[in-house]
Image (cartoon, rainbow, N blue to C red):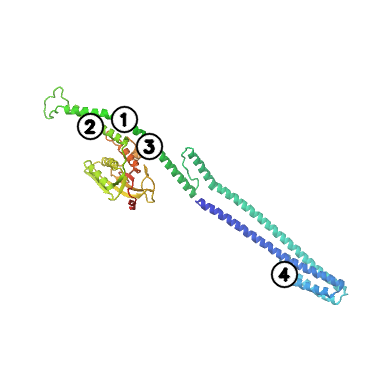
Amino acid sequence: MRSLQAKIVFVYLALTALIVGLAIVALVELERIADKAREGGKVAELFDATLEMRRFEKNHFLYHQAHDLSEHARFSARARELLRRNADTLDSLAGAGTSAGLGADLERYERAMRAHAGRAGDERLAGEVRGLGNRIVTLGERLSSLERRSTNAALAAHQRTLLWSLAVVAVFLVLTGLLTARQVTRPLQAMEQRMQAVASGQLTRLSADGPERELASLSDAFNHVLDELERRQHTLVRAEKLASLGTLLSGVAHELNNPLSNISSSAQILKEELPPAPDPGAHAEVPDGTLSTLQRQLIEDIDAETLRARRIVRALLDYAGEREFKPVPVHLADLVQETLRFLRNMRPAGVEVRVDIAPWLAVCGDRPRLQQVLLNLLVNAYDAMGKTGVLSIHARAARAGASHDRFPAPMGQCRPGAAVVDLSLADTGPGIPEALLPRVFDPFFTSKPVGQGSGLGLFIAYEIIAEHGGCIVATNRVNGGAEFHIRLPAAHAQQTTDTP
């Protein structure tokens, strides 16, 4: 049994069956005692009839009254009737043939009594009557004694049965208590201790010590709470770090912006004042004071790298800046098509883009910021695929936390039960190394070669999605390539009619 409920029901049914069994045994024993009492009553009634018969016999011998003789005959007939009705009882008490022997003695006794009534002075008949009467009474007394012993034996047997039954109940109760302590109390105590450890700050996961379904469900629910607590704690720590980082980046960006502007301006002035470059086909000597080709290239590199540094500083300022957030209904199909048009010159000729988004799907968000997320993800996908590949963009309406919800483990602010729109961008590139997946949204983290990425694109995308109350996660496709899943709040609840 893998359920506490089943075990408790089993113990309850076992106790009920035991109690019912004991009750049945007690009733059977009481019925046996009642039978013994009824048998004792029959024997006592027969014994009383014989005693009354002897009493009127003596009265007749003393007073020779007709009334005593008639009463003697009446009680004799009564004894004979009782003997006939209770023959089986008497045989069971004193052995087979007891009732027949007693009946024969009673019949001889009656004949002798009738003969004596005709010859009252015959002492021989009187002695025979007394002898037969005494024999009948003695046998009746013996039967009464046997019945009392039988009844006492039945009572003693019933007492022993009751004591054994109580002992069995006591043992069963002890075993039930031990089983309950082992199967129910101990796991709950262990769970209580671990919960106290969690309350004191030790995030120790629970493990079900037994196969009981309820304890396993409770452990899973508690572990889920711990996971959620750790995730929220991680999110809080991350938010605090990012807030500090934003303040730091804002100050650093402002400080770097001026010297970068001066460097860029100086490089532009040098480029404008350069004399014409010598003809590569000419063999004339380069005059003194004329810049060589290497020097010209160095000035070009300075200018290009300065522009790249300024773009990084601008990205930092965009992240750290406090721009007003204006959520409005945004149709995803239009936003994706517009963003693809912006990047049409960056898209390699061999890359195919497949878009599957219903025109009525809309999210609630800030359009420029959402477009910045799409720009970052599309540029990364183009860079990952190289010259050829397929980029698939798909969106559908859903209900967060529903039974058919297959959205991966979210990173962000998604709330269960909300009407959402899920957007996915999947490429056919090499994918993301599994060891790097948890870090792709960290600031300044990039898997691109040095000089080809700032590591801020996905970080800013994550922040924008979280700001919208959504979540984003990166995964690898089974057939190769990376896939980014974005979940955003739906603009209208009726959009959830679309099913996966």
* Cβ atoms at labels 4 and 1 below 8 Å apart: no
Cα distance, mark 3 to mark 2? 34 Å
Cα distance, mark 2 to mark 1? 21 Å
Q: Which three-letter amino acid code belongs to the residue tagged 3? A: Ala
Q: Judge left or right: residue 212 versus residue 399.
A: right
First in sequence, mark 2 or 1: give its number: 1
The residue carrying mark 4 is: 87
Q: Which three-letter amino acid code belongs to the residue tagged 1? A: Val
The residue carrying mark 3 is: 239
Q: Nearer the viewer, mark 4 or mark 1?
A: 1
The residue carrying mark 2 is: 304
Cα distance, mark 4 to mark 1? 121 Å
Classify 107 as above or below 179.
below
Q: Nearer the viewer, mark 4 or mark 3?
A: 3
> In the figure, residue 45 lies in which quadrant?
bottom right
The residue carrying mark 1 is: 252
First in sequence, mark 3 or 1: give its number: 3
Label 1, secondary structure: give it.
Answer: helix
Q: Which three-letter amino acid code belongs to the residue tagged 2? A: Ala
Q: Nearer the viewer, mark 2 or mark 1?
A: 1
